[in-house]
Image (cartoon, rainbow, N blue to C red):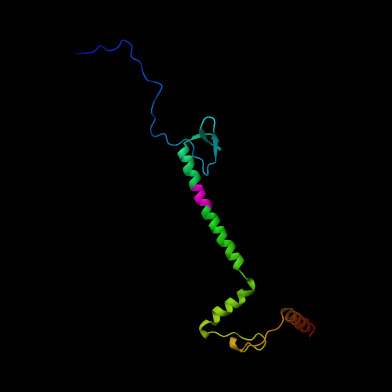
């Protein structure tokens, strides 16, 4: 039962498989152009055809990074909004005073005192004026 081979053998040269070539587009942070007529996705930087799955994966990964970056920026914004420079001195004073191991010194007489001894406050502008006058009077002497 040997069948006779056809006299003319037709080769399939139109299709070849090339393995191990790797991806053509190696661009970082790719941006894509979608050709809706030909249903193709190309890289906007190098113009190479990109597999639609790879494009979708890249976009999803970039979106995750963008969300992480937005979260970091929002956290920085919260920190900036909560930053109160006028309280920095008080926070440092509280940190050193905690546990009553250290005591502040009076800037005028250089004697230590307990924070509980503070019972009066003075207007900020009044004190600024008083300090300027004291500095000017010390220059005149």
Percent from the top left, x then y, of residue 13? 39, 20
Residue 112 visible from this viewpoint: no
| Quadrant in which the N terminus is drawn | top left
Could you say which is closer to the camera, residue 71 or residue 125? 71
Q: Is residue 125 left or right of residue 118?
A: right
Is residue 121 inside the magenta stretch?
A: no
Count of picture labels: 0
Q: Residue furthest top?
A: 7
Could you say which is closer to the camera, residue 97 or residue 84? 84
Residue 134 visible from this viewpoint: yes
Is residue 62 inside the magenta stretch?
A: yes
Residue at left 46%, top 40%? 54
Q: Is residue 124 left or right of residue 40?
A: right
Residue at left 59%, top 62%? 77
Q: Is residue 29 above or below residue 47?
A: below
Residue at left 56%, top 79%? 94
Q: Quadrant of residue 141?
A: bottom right
Could you say which is closer to the camera, residue 94 or residue 133? 94
Percent from the top left, x then y, of residue 6? 30, 11
Percent from the top left, x then y, of residue 53? 45, 39
Residue at left 57%, top 85%? 103
Q: Which residues are magenta?
A: 61-66
Q: Is residue 20 left or right of residue 63?
A: left
Q: Is residue 50 above or below residue 110?
A: above
Percent from the top left, x then y, of residue 72? 54, 58
């Amino acid at each position: 039962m040997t069948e006779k081979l056809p006299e003319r053998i037709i080769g399939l040269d139109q299709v070849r498989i090339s393995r191990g070539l790797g991806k053509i587009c190696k661009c970082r942070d790719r941006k894509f152009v979608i050709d809706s007529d030909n249903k193709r996705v190309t890289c906007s930087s190098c113009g190479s055809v990109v597999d639609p799955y790879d494009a979708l994966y890249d976009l999803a990964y970039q979106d995750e990074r963008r969300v992480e970056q937005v979260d970091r920026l929002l956290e920085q914004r919260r920190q900036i909004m909560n930053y109160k420079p006028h309280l920095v001195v008080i926070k440092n004073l509280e940190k050193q005073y905690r546990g009553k191991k250290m005591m502040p010194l009076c800037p005028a007489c250089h004697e230590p005192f307990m924070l509980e001894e503070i019972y009066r406050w003075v207007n900020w502008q009044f004190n600024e004026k008083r300090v300027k006058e004291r500095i000017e009077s010390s220059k005149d002497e």
